[in-house]
Image (cartoon, rainbow, N blue to C red):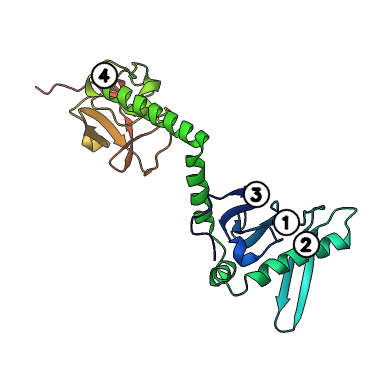
Amino acid sequence: MADESPFKGGRLGPFHLGRRYKHKELGAGLGRVYEAHNVDTGASALVLTPDRNADWEPMEDWRISASSHESPPYVALEVGHAPASGRLPALAELLDLLASAVERLEQNAEARAHLTREPIGLARRWLGRSRRWLRSWRGRTLAGLATVALGVGLWLGITGLDSSPEPGALTTHGVGAEAAARLDAPIMIDKHDRGEMAIAYPMPGGPFRNQAKAPCFPDEGEVEINGGCWVALEKRPPCLKNQAEHQGKCYLPVAASARKPQSILP
C-alpha cells in the first residue's frame, strides 16, 4: 500500500512522480518505488530509484518497451534507445529490477488500479502542470505582477488617465460624444467618391466634426446613430479593421462635404 502521507511529487526525466510505496511491502534491496505518469503521453508508470540500502545503480542509458499479445500469442521487447557500447547484462539487470517491483506489488490493489487505468488526458495534464507552476516561486511572482498590472490598467481606464485626443488611441476605449465633436474623423466615406476607406474604432458617442449630422437622408441609405449620419454596409461582423461596428452591423460615416445644397421652394 502507498504511504499514507502523499509524496509531494516532482519531475524525474519524462515522469512526474506520485505516491511512494512502503519499504516494508517491497522488501529490502529494491530501492524506492513510486507511482508515476509520463508527462508527455499521460501513460501510467512505475519508477524505481536506488536508496542507500539498494545494491544496484544504473550504469547505462536504455529505453525499452515490452508488449504481450493474446492472439496470436507472443511477447516482445522493443528497444527505443540503446547505448553504442550497450551490454546485455545491463539490460538483463534492468528487466530483473522491473520484474521484481511488479512481483512485490502483484497483490496490491492500488498498484493494479494505477497500472491498468487509462492514460491521463491532455487537459488534465496541463491543469496539473499549471497548478504546480503556480505553486512555484516563479509562478507566484508572475501571477502577482500580472495582478498588479491588471489593477493599474483598470484604474487608468476608470480615471481616464490613459485617454488621448489622437484617433489612434480611440480604438480601444471608443469615443464619447463630447470628444468626437472636437475631432475630425481620420477617414470618411464620401457618397460621391466610394474609393475612400472607413474608420478603425468603435461607434462614437456623437458625430465627428467633419461628419454629416442629423437630420439624415434615409432615402439615400443614411441612418442616424448618436446624432451622426452613417451608411450601413452589406458586410456583417466581424467587420474589417477599418470599419465601425454597431449592434451587429458594419458602418461608414457620411462626410459633411457630401451634402448637396438644398433648393428653397417659394
Disc 4 residue type (three-letter)? Ala
Give the crowd class for mark 2: few <14, some 14-19, many >=20 residues within 10 Å.
some
Image-quadrant location for residue 231:
top left
**Which badge, 1 or 3, comes first in the chain's sequence?**
3
* x 57%, y 63%: residue: 119
Give the crowd class for mark 4: few <14, some 14-19, many >=20 residues within 10 Å.
some
Name the quarter where the C terminus is drawn: top left
Q: List the single residue furthest toward the left.
A: 266
* x 76%, y 62%: residue: 64
Image-quadrant location for residue 156:
top left
Query: Image check: 227 left or right of 103?
Result: left
Give the label on residue 54, or none.
1
Q: Mark 4 points at which residue?
A: 179
Disc 3 residue type (three-letter)? Leu
Q: What element carries label 3?
A: strand
* x 40%, y 22%: residue: 168
Q: Is mark 2 on a helix, strand or loop?
A: helix
